[in-house]
Amino acid sequence: MTYTSKVKEEIVKHDISKPEMICELSAFLMFGATLNEKITITLENASITRRIYYYFKELFSIRPKIIIRNQKRFRVKQIYILEITEKVKEILNNLNIIQDNKKVLPQEYFFPSREEKIAYLEGIFLATGTINDPATSGYHFEVVTNLNREAKFISNLFKAININAKYIKRNSKYMVYIKNAEVISEIIRMFGGIQSYFYYEDIRIYRDHKNMVNRLNNCEIANQEKAINTGLKQIADIKYLKDNDLYDLIDESTKIVLTYREKYPESSLKELADIIALETDYKIGKSGVNHHFIKIRKLIQNHKEKQTNNNK
């Protein structure tokens, strides 16, 4: 069973109010059913089939016809087909799906409360939605629809409950999607998939922690590499001073810093400052150490410039 199926299995087990049932069923028929002289719903999930069947029985006092077929593509699985031939126009009118015999998106009055908006989005998810398993792939939530205006409507409905959902055209359909892990986790909880929510959060927190540790390790490695490269350049500068008889031109405090740099070539400027302050009477900080190396860098540059001028 896929993670999406597990989430949906859990969602359909929690109870909702009658107004929420109406919103959820409306969304499911709008985005997951074939509507003409009759209503036809094709499902692979037995639990969702039972829930939709119950809604028709509870809300409209009708019992849909159930057809069960075995599909043998790749593997044998059961397909459930619900057919409603009674009160079709009454149902679609009451669920705000048709007006003047035309299929329309529901008006805002249809779901005045946050709970009813969530129920409608839940119905869309049950009909066409998927959520990637966070343990096996990236964070991704999506619902699929046929028309641009429907995708925009769903995106705006998410926005109405303070969730940012984007949509794009994919082949001949439109995909409304969310990639923010925390938001997806909140949607699962909001739809009533509590165990699925805990599973998602465990994986998300683990992955976030792992990523944070990796970033810190990478940062530490980068800092170490930077310190080593800086130390090697400074050692090269000290060698230049000695090779060109410039060493005696520097003051005693700078000589202390250079001596300790030669002893500790891989130390950072901060570590070098702490060692000097600990082992000598010269109290110095990171910026002080850096200042000494700036001075010898200028001394070397001046010497190189004079040599260049003399060779002209």
Image: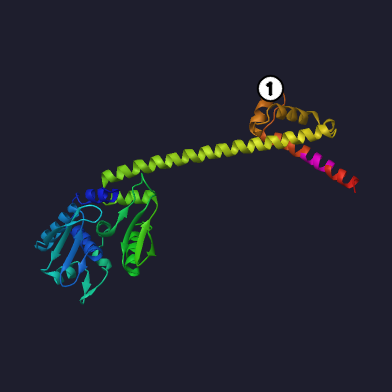
Please tell me whether mark 1 sits on a helix, a strand or a loop: helix
The residue nearer to you, when weighing 289 against 73, is 73
Give the vertical position of 226 relative to 55 (above or below). Answer: above
Q: Which residues are magenta?
A: 297-303
Q: How is the image coloured?
A: rainbow
x, y (%) of residue 293? 74, 36
> For the point 77% across and 40% down, which residue is it?
297
> For the point 65% across and 28% down, which residue is it?
274
x, y (%) of residue 82? 15, 61
**Magenta-colored stretch includes residue 274:** no
Q: Is residue 272 visible?
A: yes
Which amino acid type is marked by label 1? Glu
Quarter where residue 116 is shown:
bottom left
The residue that disc 1 covers is 279
Give the vertical position of 46 relative to 279 (above or below). Answer: below
Give the vertical position of 209 relative to 16 (above or below). Answer: above
Quarter where residue 147 is shown:
bottom left
Indicate left or right for 71 with 181 as reference.
Answer: left
Indicate left or right for 248 with 10 as reference.
Answer: right
Q: Is residue 250 visible?
A: no
x, y (%) of residue 85? 11, 68
The residue nearer to you, when weighing 72 against 211, is 72
x, y (%) of residue 79? 18, 57
Q: Main secondary structure of the magenta part?
A: helix
